[in-house]
Image (cartoon, rainbow, N blue to C red):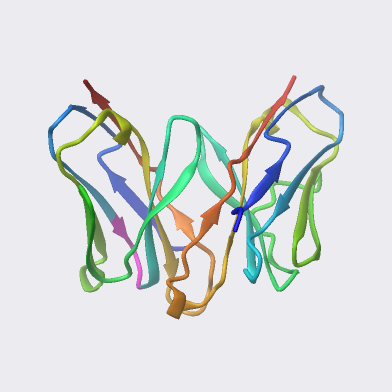
Amino acid sequence: DAGVIQSPRHEVTEMGQEVTLRCKPISGHDYLFWYRQTMMRGLELLIYFNNNVPIDDSGMPEDRFSAKMPNASFSTLKIQPSEPRDSAVYFCASNSGELISGNTIYFGEGSWLTVV
Amino acid sequence: GIQVEQSPPDLILQEGANSTLRCNFSDSVNNLQWFHQNPWGQLINLFYIPSGTKQNGRLSATTVATERYSLLYISSSQTTDSGVYFCAVEPAGGSYIPTFGRGTSLIVHP
């Protein structure tokens, strides 16, 4: 398997613009997570999905952030409008959720977002 | 929610040295994993270890679930071991939300 695939890898955008980050989880994985990493706050869980359904979005910072998972192989995280404080690395991760298989979480390579 | 504390926050080693990284958690867990984030930002799973001991080459990990801690041992460290080591736990009770510690930043000098 190719692993969790994220795009874009790097994005620089101006304040106020819309940003869309994309993720393709590992085939067969039922759980998908969006994390944000900053120096100040470390790795924060923003939202996670189970079988394409959002389960917990309590980590989404504010209404400017939204996430969707229209099917089992694709998810988006959208920021509209973007602000400089949104600059961070955004990781997508997936796992099978089965304890018997070790429940290992696999991360994508991250999307490095800079808002100027 | 569950609290995850890692120590030390920073560690500098000379190549060849051994080290122990610690992860304490505040509540019962179903799952614990150790990750290495390399200097390029990639997060790689090292161990899935909710209890017991595992070894993989120069790395080994031990989790004592009853005492709510896990240890990651790095022996004969190499410069490629540099990066940040994260512990992530999934609280007991059916939630699959992995909660990460703040990590231990390791620098190995040649």
Residue A48 x/y as whole percent: 65, 62
Q: Is residue A77 left or right of residue A27?
A: right
Q: Is residue A25 left or right of residue B67?
A: right
Please say if B92 is above or below B9: below
Per the image, is A49 magenta?
A: no
The region drawn magenta spans B24-28
Residue at image point 63% right, 67% down: A31
Looking at the image, how many numbered discs can be counted on the residues?
0
Please say if B97 is above or below A92: below
The secondary structure that most of the magenta stretch takes on is loop
Residue at image point 64% right, 71% down: A28
Residue B58 x/y as whole percent: 20, 47
Q: Report the quarter where the C terminus of chain B lies.
A: top left
Residue at image point 80% right, 33% down: A82
**Residue at the front extreme of this rendering:** A1
Residue B89 can be seen in this image = yes
Residue B71 x/y as whole percent: 22, 55
Please say if A44 is above or below A101: above
